[in-house]
Image (cartoon, rainbow, N blue to C red):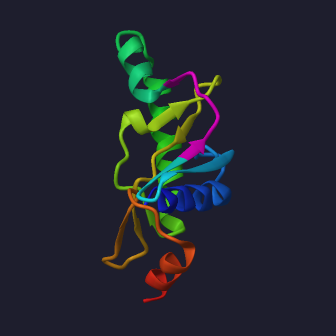
Amino acid sequence: MFALEAHYHRTAASLCSNYLVPLLHLYENNIDDNKQELWLIMPRYPMSLRKYLTQHIHEISFAKVISFALTIAQALAELHRLEIVHRDLKSSNIMLDDNEQCHIIDFGTVKLGLSNRTLLGTAPLPPEMIAAYLQS
């Protein structure tokens, strides 16, 4: 459902682009009849929040920590407003740009809306199957 991850990442990024890493291009490669690869092309960011915190743990200011927390909270509020639950948010899934602004990546597992339905981003699914699933 790599295609599903790409679909939800693209959808979420187009709706709240200030907080999410945009998908620049998708490339699908059929290796053989039983195996496919899906490449998600995204901008390169200098480091993850995890790496930043590890490198700056002794000198990071309280104001910077609050700034990161507020940005992440705003991103999550925007996702939740769209009824998208990330479910794998961690410091290694938050990238920092050159201005140290946070951007969320990795939509491998999302929960949609208030339902109990869960979609995992690990096997390819055609769009019509996704649409039928969401309408059920």
Residue 110: give x, y in percent of width and height.
40, 61
Residue 133 sits in which quadrant? bottom left
What residue sits 59% from the left and 46% below the top? 19
Residue 7: give x, y in percent of width and height.
56, 61
Most distant residue in the left direction: 116
Q: Nearer the viewer, residue 84 or 10?
A: 10
Q: Examine the rendered structure and indicate whether residue 31 appears above or below residue 59.
A: below
Instruction: Decide whether residue 40 is among the magenta residues.
Output: yes
What residue sits 66% from the left and 50% below the top? 17
Q: Is residue 78 visible?
A: no
Residue 56: give x, y in percent of width and height.
41, 13
Q: Examine the rendered structure and indicate whether residue 132 appears above or below residue 76.
A: below
Q: Quadrant of the N terminus?
A: bottom left
Q: Nearer the viewer, residue 47 or 18?
A: 47
Q: Examine the rendered structure and indicate whether residue 26 appears above or below residue 99.
A: below
Q: Nearer the viewer, residue 41 or 94?
A: 41
- Judge left or right: residue 23 versus residue 122: right
* Label tally: 0
Residue segment shown in magenta: 39-47
